[in-house]
Each structure stands twice: as C-alpha cells, then as structure tokens.
Image: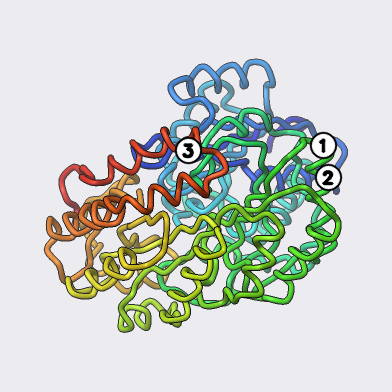
C-alpha cells in the first residue's frame, strides 16, 4: 500500500482518428475531482487531457509527471481510447513504479478483466464513478479494507477480483458542480466539440443521467433509471458558468434530455425569464417522437442553435429489434417542424444491425435523404461489451480478431447484417453522397449555423465520408 498519498493526476486518454476529432470538457474527471474536494481537503489535483496534445502526448505527459509528481494516476478512457490508456499506464509506471494507476470510464467498466491483465494497472473503477472512486481513494489513504468496497477491480495473487457493482446516485443535486477550475477552458473553446459546427465559448453539461429505454446497442454506465437534477440546480450552474467563464452556449449531453417534457420546458422557460444570455445545443440525440411544437417554440425562444435526433433506423422491424420503438411518422413531423422553426437539425442513423437486410438499410437512407434534416451521420452498429447487442452476436465474435480501431462508429469494420460487408460499406458511403449532394442542405447549414467560418472546416470532413476507407474487414 502506498503511503502519504497527496497528489492525484487525472489523465484523459487520447483517440486520434481520421473521422472523429471532437474534443469536449472531461466532465467525468471534473465530477470526480469536485466530489473528492467535497469530502476531503488533503489532496491536490491536476488534469492532463491528451486529446488536446495531438502529436505531443509523450512530451505533455512526461512534463506533467516530472512537475506534479503524482502519487496516483487516474486514467479515463472509452474503448476506442484503450491503446492510449495502456500506453499512459506504462509511462506512469516507468516514471515512478510506486505511483498507483487507477483506470475508469466506459472501457474499464465494460472490459474489466482485459484492463486488469495489464500489470501496470493497479485498480479499476466501474460504473458511475464519484462515490466509488472516492471510497477507493479514502481506503488507500486511511488504510481501509479494499475488498469491502463496491464497484472496483484489482488483482490478488494473480487473480482478477471484481467486487459487486455499486448503486447509482439518486440525489444529483447533492453532487457539487464539476471542477471547472481544473480545465483550461480556453483550449476547449478553440476546438470542435460534439455539436460539430463551431469553435465558441461553451460548456458541456449533464442535466440528467441515464435513460429508461433499453436500446440493445446502448451503454449501461448510468443504469436505466432516469435521474434528474432540479431545474434550480441546472440554472444555478449555468449562471456560474456565465459569470466564471463567460460561456455563451450550454451543450447538453444528456442521454434523453426531453424524456420529462415538462421539466425540459421549465428549463427553457427559466432561461428565457431570467435572461441568462446562454444559448443551447443538443448534440447527443433527443428522443425524436417527444419533440412537440410547444417544446420547439421554447427551444427557439431560449436561443437553441442545434438539435440532434437519434433515429437509428427507419425500418419498423429493426426499431423493434433494437427496442428503440420510435414513432417514425412523429419523428418525421418533428424534423419538419424544427426545420420550419429555423433550428439546425442533425440526425443519427445506424446500419449493420444483426441480420438487417439491404432493403431495410435502404429504407433508413431514404428516410434521411427525404427528410428535412440539415446534417446526417451514418454509422455502423458496434457491439460494445455490456450491451444486449454484444450478447446477441457474441458467438459470432468468438475467435474473430478485432482491435480498438474497430469501435470507431464511422469506419467500423464490424458487420452482423445480412448484407455482404463490401456492399454494406458501399451503402454507407452512398448514404453520405446522396444526403449531402443536395444543395439546399448546404444553403440551410450556411443560413442556420451561427459560426459560418467553421463550415470551411466541416466540409472536408463530410466529403471524406463519401468514400470511407477501411483496412481488412474483421467480420
């Protein structure tokens, strides 16, 4: 057990990819810091976000280790970032073998044994991390019994020990705001975030956690019980961000912000009434059949700049298979109403679901092309471990070589559909061409985007998807 723990260096793993260069504030890490600060006053923290240092990761990490000399390195990663997480852990141990390495985030949660097989990793934290991580840190400092903790993993006599999962935090208002002071806000202001469309003074924010729907492709980090922050709590954080950092936009990244439509309306109403001077964007996918004219009117009045509708498939059979069960006519109508209201509207679509047919894929593409969406993203379905989709195809995954790059949504090489793989990829590239070779869409994007200069940066990214290149196919 390491004694005298005083300093924790949090490291966000990097994910260099041709098709995904989006970077947002590391909210998960920032929540961990703020929660630890709430219960302990004997620790120092620092964040190194390697996504901000493309091409300079080695130097940036080395400088931070030399200067800060951490006792604990906490590494956060999604599956696509797992090679970076492994690399960071090795560098930390090379710098100081006594520095404890704790990994958390979606990848360690879904692949705990794989992560713990790396001898450079001492512990993992799974699921919703604030309480679990804080309990682990307190046990390490105060000499508590690690095996009694929930939601962690470690090795004992070369055996991987995973303790039972912890519960979820019901009172989200009881969490302090993320530790915004530990993030270099100006760096994030100058990068393209999840909303895609521009560099600006923004902050991403969770107003709720989890989603009660049980889509088979979706994660389970926050569970399936919809939990919300009060409207007062959300408004208070927006006021703080406005005063402290001068933000002009809140990028809401809830799983399903508009599940409780009355609450959604109240957030917009309060924003209007109190004249916050903060616009909104919704890059993470609103529930498309829960967007009515009243909500659209309030979104527009509150200064909403863009929304995203996660459609996934326009096939009724696939909607049932994936358990999304959208009311597709209602979604089409909502898209039309958003277009009419002047909201920049983006749609998410997926193809390659288990045993999906070519006609079903074409139905989805036709829906997108014929809709009034201004932006569309066409992804390949990815079977992340911990999802029901993974369980459906796990027999087909056995003994099939694949690597972290395959979890890139745009250029994924997974294919569980009934369509030959090369044909699936052609359908995906064709979808981008059909959608974006309609001039009216570019005119709409130009008209509605508040950051028109960034369209020059966005156009090459779109065109690159007209012919998505991949290495050899895995499945």
Q: Which residue is mark 2?
A: 240
Name above or below for residue 456 compared with residue 250. Answer: above
Q: Is residue 355 visible?
A: no
The answer to whether 121 is drawn above or below residue 316 in the figure is above
Q: Which residue is mark 3?
A: 85
Where is residue 9? Give x, y as percent.
66, 32
The percent position of residue 376, horizontal first and vertical second, equals 38, 56
Q: Is residue 170 above or below residue 279?
A: below
Q: Earlier in the sequence, mark 3 or mark 2?
A: 3
- Closest to the camera, between mark 3 and mark 1, is 1
The answer to whether the residues at label 3 and label 1 have Cβ atoms under 8 Å apart is no
Q: Secondary structure at mark 1?
A: helix
Horizontal and vertical percent for residue 381?
A: 32, 62
Mark 3: secondary structure: helix
Q: Which mark is residue 244?
A: 1
Q: Nearer the viewer, mark 3 or mark 2?
A: 2
* Image-based side of 253 in relation to 174, left or right: left
- Residue drawn at 77 percent across, 34 percent down: 181
The mark found on residue 35 in the picture is none
- Mark found first going from the N terminus, 3 or 1: 3
Q: Is residue 210 left or right of residue 324?
A: right
Q: Are marks 2 and 1 in contact (CB under 8 Å)?
A: yes
Q: How is the image coloured?
A: rainbow
């Amino acid at each position: 057990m390491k004694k005298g723990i005083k300093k924790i260096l949090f490291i966000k793993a990097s994910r260099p990819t041709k098709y995904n260069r989006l970077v947002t504030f590391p909210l998960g890490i920032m929540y961990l810091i703020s929660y630890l600060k709430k219960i302990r006053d004997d620790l120092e923290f620092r964040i190194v976000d390697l996504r901000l240092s493309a091409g300079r990761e080695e130097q940036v990490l080395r400088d931070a280790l030399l200067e800060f000399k951490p006792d604990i390195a906490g590494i956060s990663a999604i599956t696509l970032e797992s090679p970076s997480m492994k690399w960071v852990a090795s560098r930390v141990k090379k710098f100081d073998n006594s520095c404890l390495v704790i990994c958390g985030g979606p990848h360690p949660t879904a692949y705990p044994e794989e992560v713990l097989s790396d001898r450079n990793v001492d512990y993992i934290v799974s699921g919703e991390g604030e309480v679990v991580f804080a309990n682990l840190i307190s046990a390490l400092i105060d000499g508590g019994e690690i095996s009694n903790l929930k939601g962690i993993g470690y090795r004992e006599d070369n055996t991987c020990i995973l303790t039972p999962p912890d519960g979820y935090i019901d009172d989200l208002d009881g969490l302090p705001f993320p530790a915004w002071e530990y993030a270099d806000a100006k760096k994030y202001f100058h990068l393209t975030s999840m909303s895609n469309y521009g560099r600006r003074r923004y902050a991403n924010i969770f107003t709720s956690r989890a989603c009660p729907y049980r889509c088979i492709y979706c994660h389970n980090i926050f569970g399936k019980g919809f939990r919300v922050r009060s409207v007062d709590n959300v408004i208070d954080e927006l006021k703080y961000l406005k005063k402290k950092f001068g933000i002009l936009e809140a990028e809401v990244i809830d799983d399903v912000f508009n599940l409780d439509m009355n609450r959604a309306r109240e957030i917009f109403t309060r924003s209007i009434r109190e004249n916050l001077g903060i616009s909104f964007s919704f890059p993470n996918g609103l529930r498309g059949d829960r967007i009515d004219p009243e909500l659209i009117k309030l979104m527009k009045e509150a200064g909403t700049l863009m929304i995203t509708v996660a459609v996934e498939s326009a096939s009724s059979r696939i909607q049932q298979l994936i358990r999304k069960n959208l009311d597709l006519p209602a979604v089409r109508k909502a898209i039309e109403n958003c277009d009419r209201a002047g909201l920049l509207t983006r749609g998410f679509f997926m193809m390659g679901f288990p045993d999906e047919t070519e006609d079903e894929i074409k139905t989805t593409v036709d829906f997108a092309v014929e809709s009034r969406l201004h932006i569309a993203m066409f992804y390949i379905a990815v079977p992340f471990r911990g999802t029901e989709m993974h369980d459906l195809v796990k027999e087909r995954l056995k003994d099939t070589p694949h690597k972290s790059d395959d979890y890139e949504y745009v250029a994924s090489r997974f294919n569980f559909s009934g369509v030959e793989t090369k044909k699936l990829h052609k359908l995906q590239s064709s979808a981008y061409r059909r959608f974006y070779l309609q001039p009216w869409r570019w005119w709409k994007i130009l008209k509605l985007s508040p950051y028109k200069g960034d369209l020059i940066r966005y156009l090459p990214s779109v065109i690159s998807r007209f012919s998505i290149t991949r290495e050899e196919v895995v499945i």
